Image: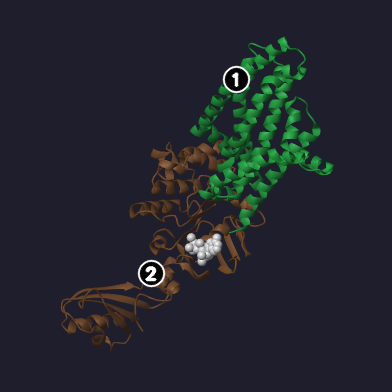
Amino acid sequence: MRGTLVIAGKELRGFFASPTFYVMLFLITLIMSYIYPIQLTLFNQMLMSYVMQPGMPQQQLNIHYGLFLRLLSYLNLMLIFIVPALTMKLIAEEKKMRTFDLLLTSPVKSVDIVLGKYLAALGAILGIMGVAFLYPLVTASFATVNWAPLVISFIGIFLVAGVYAAMDLFCSSLTESALVAYVMSVMMNVSIWFIGLSAEVVDSQKARQVFEHLSLNTHLAGLVEGTVRTSGLVFLLSLVILFIFLAERVVESSRWRA
Amino acid sequence: MIEVRDLTKDYGPHRAIHALNFTVKKGDVVGFLGPNGAGKSTTMKIITGFMAPTSGTARIAGFDVFESPLEVKKRIGYLPETPPVYTDMYVRDYLRYVARLKGMEKNRIEKSIDRAVEKTSLGDVQKRLIGHLSKGFRQRVGIAQAIVSDPDVLVLDEPTVGLDPKQMHEIRELIRELRGQHTIILSTHILPEVQATCERAIIINKGRIVAEDSIANLATLEKGRSRLFVRLRREVGDLGAVLSDIDGVMGVESGSSNREWRVNLRGNEDTVDAVSSRLVSQGYGLLEFSPSKVDLEDVFLKLTYGQSRGGEA
Ligand SMILES: Nc1ncnc2c1ncn2[C@@H]1O[C@H](COP(=O)(O)OP(=O)(O)O)[C@@H](O)[C@H]1O
Ligand SMILES: [Mg+2]
């Protein structure tokens, strides 16, 4: 536990002291600031057209669906590429620079190493989500925002990012090259996201259910709509635990190899 | 403090070390000497709990490295062949991180960083990025991280490799200063390093220990052997023929010219006396005549490469 916190602290400080992290934050802000006014205008147009021709689905008119959900889906898209950038070096670089020797000869367990790095990645993700949360905050100054579903959907995105972080940390543990880790991670993130697509092409009812369950999309959808389903939470958390466990195994095995 | 029993490590089919046995007592400074590929790093990686042995045991302060790795790691400071430094960290922050990793109590950390910085003369650079430091300074940071947790045992793997002669000298001085505060085991393939820093040497070759003794004893490993350096005014074609009938003369080698010779002897002062009188009586013009023991280098080369520099019978 002590080891976990020491490592998490070091890595977290590393993120927030690194210029690249701020460049990344800046780019996210740039993209969000570009998308936000466009979405706002679209939402506005939709409201206008409702006034002229009533009969549209009511749901679309809610600011939560009409504006924030769209923003969040862009945020999710960005996270697919950003989380790997955060995690790619966490273990791969230690191996390459031989600083891993220090960790492996320090009185900390493999699980401390992996958890410490995972927590740091979550901290950095939280920073990014904080920046993204500024947009609804600003919106609240001129429109009525329903906070509960909004917060739940942010938590949903955070959980999904947590799944990415666990998978990507596992990728980082597999290689000495940060670049290889990045590419592997993006592929993992994309495939877990789109595994749900298979549900639409298989015939068997059973198979469809399996694919739907495996799809992050399905589980995120519920959370993003502001409803918390236990099965979804359990699924996301078990993915996190699975990949943390796998990464721990990889780190542990490097002690017994050459 | 360090007890190694029948330690064996296989890399696939290749056996890197064969059933090593040695003991290092508390406070000792021991040199682990051997040519490249002898198995020094392998042994050190096992002692530090970095790598598991194929068979055999290693105990540090009574704790088995395999059964209680955390206890062992708390008590060890390790400098691997490549110093494990983060180039994007400041020297002082890095040392603080290592001290925390090693589980030092909070209130002792700053003091022990000060001590490590002072010992390794890093005072001027402690607020610099490690990535901006020269190789010599990085090596010092590596040593500083090994001593920062004030460990009982220091394991230094080739601490001077890749440094220039001045830096090498400084690191050796530093290791000498650490004597008495830690039990130290340092590996090297450079003999003078062991002579300069250690009290005892373990010579290892091809994964086996070939000699283990104090430096002084190793130097006189082949008892009663000595060597004379002789410089003459006149050239002599074959000094061996001149001295051959003296009892105890083993052989001669010429030096840079036919005026300089090395004479290998077995025997006592009588032999030396006889050689000097013969040279004087023959009127060769004896300019220099200095006895020396067979030096450690010969022993080392002989033990590890199966040859001695002296080409006597
Ligand atoms: N990871 C490894 N895989 C395979 N063989 C290795 C490995 N590390 C070292 N060896 C071999 O084991 C032997 C001992 O190596 P090492 O302990 O590094 O020697 P030293 O440190 O004395 O130079 C060498 O023959 C080396 O080639
Ligand atoms: Mg070596």
Nearest the viewer among B187 and A88 is: A88
Residue lying furthest bottom: B245
Q: Mark 2 points at which residue?
A: B297
**Residue B27 visible in the displayed image:** yes
What letter labels the chain drawn in green? A
Residue B312's disc is: none
The part of the image, by quadrant, that contains residue B247 is bottom left
**Residue A90 visible in the displayed image:** no
Q: In this view, does A64 lie to the left or right of A29?
A: right
Instruction: Report if the beta carbon of the residue with label 2 is closer than 8 angstroms to ligand 1.
Output: no
Q: What is the x, y in percent for residue A239?
A: 72, 41
Which amino acid does the dot numbered 2 rest on?
Answer: Glu
Seen at 52% across and 27% down, the residue is A26
Up the image or down, B62 lies above or below B141; here it is below
Q: Which chain carries label 1?
A: A
In which quadrant of the rendered image does the C terminus of chain A lie?
bottom right
Q: Mark 1, residues whose alpha carbon is within 10 Å: few (<14), some, or many (≥20)?
A: few
What color was chain B assigned in the picture? brown
Q: What is the x, y in percent for residue B83?
A: 48, 50
Q: What is the number of callouts on the image?
A: 2
Q: Please tell me if label 1 and label 2 are on a single chain.
A: no
In which quadrant of the rendered image does the N terminus of chain A lie?
top right
Estimate the spatial distance between the alpha carbons at disc 1 and disc 2, rounded to whole Å: 80 Å
Q: Mark 2, residues whose alpha carbon is within 10 Å: few (<14), some, or many (≥20)?
A: some
Of discs 1 and 2, which sits in the foreground?
Answer: 1
Q: Mark 1 points at which residue?
A: A38
